[in-house]
Amino acid sequence: VVVVDPIDGSLNAKRGIPFFSLSIAVAEGETMDDVHFGYVYDFGSGEEWTARRGQGAWLDGAPLGGVRPKDEIEILSFEATRSSLIARDAPKVADLAYRFRTMGSLALSLCHLAAGRVDAVCSLKGARSVDIAAGQLLCREVGVAVALFDVETPFGAAPLDLEGRSRIVAAGSEDACRRLAAALSA
């Protein structure tokens, strides 16, 4: 199974904002746990992010994982969202994060989390597998927690299809992920 999002961050691309990407994941089955290769190309910076299940993740060929997201969330990236959702949900997590960012590409935001550039990522509307399949592998390969919080399904069992959508949270630890999910679910 090959999962491709040719332009994640299409509104950024249309408006000339250099934060959009090509995202490709290759899987041996039909779930997130089956993804064995992930690739994200940042059209703005030219950075190439890759991951191989069980082998690690890399940025432009250099191993990721040396810089970790902070346990206390300094920067939280909201993604795949609209202003009305931020207005609704930002107060719920204001005590958990020092600063908010909305960049416009969920795949790239997950890459930035894997590199420790941001400390957590939340999708405030349902994300599709094409938005997260490659980026989630980078995160999981460096030990970053990723969870769905609208469904009972464990993250790894989430299907690689175009039908399913769920909000996701990702953070440097399972505890930070749980705290964000609980706050956003309230």
Image (tube, helix red, strand yellow):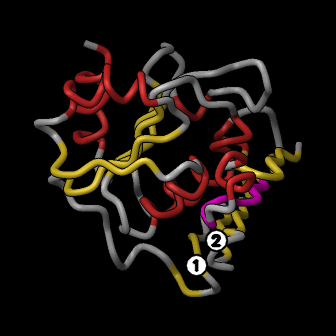
**Residue 12 image position (x, y, % from top left):** 65, 53
The disc label shown at residue 49, or none: 2
Which type of secondary structure does the marked residue at label 2 adopt? Answer: strand
- Whether residues under marks 2 and 1 lie with C-beta atoms below 8 angstroms apart, the answer is yes
The disc label shown at residue 124, or none: none
Residue at image x 79%, y 32%?
30
Tell which circle, 2 or 1, labels the residue nearer the N-terminal end. Answer: 2
3 left or right, relative to 177: right
Residue lying furthest right: 1
Crowd rating for badge 2 (residues with CA inside 10 Å; few <14, some 14–19, many 20+): many
Kind of residue at disc 2? Trp
Q: Does residue 38 show up magenta in the picture?
A: no
According to the picture, the residue beneath numbered tag 1 turns out to be 59
Residue at image x 73%, y 64%?
39
**Residue 22 image position (x, y, % from top left):** 76, 59
**Residue 107 image position (x, y, % from top left):** 61, 52
Which span of residues is magenta-colored?
Answer: 18-24
- Residue 176's image quarter? top left
Asked if 2 appears above or below 51 in the picture, the reply is: above
Is residue 140 visible in the rendered structure shown here? Answer: no
Residue lying furthest left: 95
CA gap between label 2 and label 1 equals: 5 Å
Which type of secondary structure does the marked residue at label 1 adopt? Answer: strand
Asked if 159 appears above or below 70 in the picture, the reply is: above
Is residue 45 visible in the rendered structure shown here? Answer: yes
186 left or right, relative to 171: left
On the rendered image, what quadrant is the C terminus found in? Answer: top left
